Image (spheres, coloured by chain):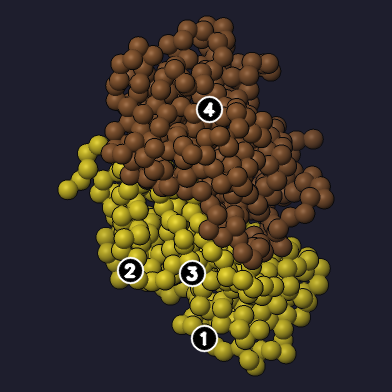
Chain colours: A yellow, B brown
Amino acid sequence: MLETMHDENSLIRKIRRELQARSGSRSSPLRLGIGDDAALWQPISGRDLILTCDWFIETVHFRRDLHPPDSIGWKCLARALSDVAAMAATPRCFLLSLAIPQSHCGKWLDNFLSGLRRASQTFGCAPAGGDTTRSSKILISVTVIGEVKTRKALLRSGARPGDLICVSGRLGEAQLGLELLLRRKSAARSSITAIEKHLYPAPRLELARQLATRKLPTSLMDLSDGLSLDLRRLCDASSVGAVIEEEKLPLPNAVGEHSSRAIRLQAALHGGDDYELLFTVPKRKLRHLPSALAGAPLTVIGEVRAGSRIVLLKSSGRRSPLESAGWDPFRGSAKGS
Amino acid sequence: MLETMHDENSLIRKIRRELQARSGSRSSPLRLGIGDDAALWQPISGRDLILTCDWFIETVHFRRDLHPPDSIGWKCLARALSDVAAMAATPRCFLLSLAIPQSHCGKWLDNFLSGLRRASQTFGCAPAGGDTTRSSKILISVTVIGEVKTRKALLRSGARPGDLICVSGRLGEAQLGLELLLRRKSAARSSITAIEKHLYPAPRLELARQLATRKLPTSLMDLSDGLSLDLRRLCDASSVGAVIEEEKLPLPNAVGEHSSRAIRLQAALHGGDDYELLFTVPKRKLRHLPSALAGAPLTVIGEVRAGSRIVLLKSSGRRSPLESAGWDPFRGSAKGS
């Protein structure tokens, strides 16, 4: 039965009930979870902590009329977890800041929490607490705390000229999924991989850990805002440039209206929300790089160069600067400009 | 000179410059701060971690036309730090989730960051990272990570029948400050303590630590939503009831239009935003309780009782149930109802 009256205390009780009670017997690092002034957590000695937070805001990142609440619950955590994967770390717990309209405290919230709980269990990241308030728009901010062996985190800043540039998975798939969703105006259960990837992305936590164990990457980050923008960030952090070969990009599969190579190429270069990994590997380690790892295909797409320019080597043989045209909330998406 | 074009990268650079560059030589627990996928932090062995987050949203918690940006910067962190004080812990670092309109990336942001930096330095809590996006409303969520000796955090749940109920400072002062501000429609520098307390609250971090060192409290929390609502939470967590004596409440000083005892009493019972401490002390320890500690007056205002009822003993000698009428975002403030 839906509760018809909601105050903050009853909302917190509901969140605790839905998220914690069903998390089963999985061992939790929490001494004290949702309900007191703050959560209490015991870190493991010899580990560094990873701290990251991520906005997920109606009309900026999702639409109330288009995105199912359980996808919003899943994705708000999955996005933040991708930043933990980007350091080759292991997530431990998360805090949920949730602001919703009074009208969304019933069925919408149930489904949202169901998606969030599923992500929490799938990726082993326990709910630790949070804050709730009302708002006419749906506002979500998720903070994730993770762990990594002391000094073993993989940073953006280690790429060196001559290193090979690699990515996991197919790039631009989530962007094609969003475009399909916008045309259909409904997220009714679909078997289309691209739509699934847009709604329920899976952070590459296991892949990142396995790459780190094999000591392959000199630098690592996740692809959340599109290759062209995120590669710029990696190059800036490492003080290097890059050449990307168009021919080598792992394009998304053709689906329905989105079959042309040009559309799929634009999505691969600039589309956001893939949550794949972007990393660099020294050339001498190429023979140790498998073609797939932890369920993800791995592709060499280019090479790190000295300087700061990022160049796209086209199929025609022409070279042109690769403009950063991925997703930026302060410019809007300039995809394909 | 103000920057006129803003993208997310330049915004992050500005935040890093303003918050980190000036934090001086204070030793920081951070291995890696703002700029990579996540922050890296080395915990101290033998300590538990405190994790807490707090919304601070335009129109819900503050008004763009009324509250100076440096107060918003100060208060968004001070509020979250109060939850760390509420566990008798020490803050270490924070994450800032900030969503603002494009038009606020210049002078408003400078002043906001100036207030935030001042709070960060005053309370020894280093900026670790965050996330930025655009939004028509100003949205802020702050996550604070703190530390406390293993198993030494003070919880809400330890109050026992017979314990004395104590508070720090004067209750309702911030509420009177807000009401004065609303009448004046300006926050022009004022020497009025109540307005200062509303704009620049100081979390009782040092007081909480000193109370814990003296092993006085059986339970502790901060007063953020008003005594009547927060005492209900403490009693629920401890499975107890309480009697509060109206005569003993430390009322705010009379200022201007807000001089009547009735108004000041309502503010003390139900006014939010004080960030004072509410705690319980065994009767046998009363003689060890100083009248002031760490700059804050301490007042015994009542007693813990068996059961679950919270009773107000009025000056007239009459008893009545104390209704929870503090601030609740899902009901709005029911102050004085």
Q: Earlier in the sequence, mark 2 or mark 1?
A: 2
Q: Chain of mark 1?
A: A
Q: Are marks 4 and 3 in contact (CB under 8 Å)?
A: no
**Mark 3 surroundings: few (<14), some (14-19) or many (≥20) residues within 10 A:** many
CA–CA distance in space, label 3 to label 1: 16 Å
Badge 2 amino acid: Gly
Disc 4 on helix, strand or loop? strand
Disc number for residue A292: 1
CA–CA distance in space, label 4 to label 2: 44 Å
Residues B99 and A302: in front is B99
Badge 1 amino acid: Ala
Residue, far left: A1
In this rendering, which labeled residue sits more in front, label 2 or label 1? 2
Give the labeled residue for mark 3.
A203
Which residue corresponds to the image point at 66% horizontal and 63% vertical from the top-left? B44
Q: Are marks 3 and 2 on the same chain?
A: yes
| Left or right of A7, for residue B143 | right
Q: Are marks 4 and 2 in contact (CB under 8 Å)?
A: no
Badge 4 amino acid: Thr
In this rendering, which labeled residue sits more in front, label 3 or label 1? 3
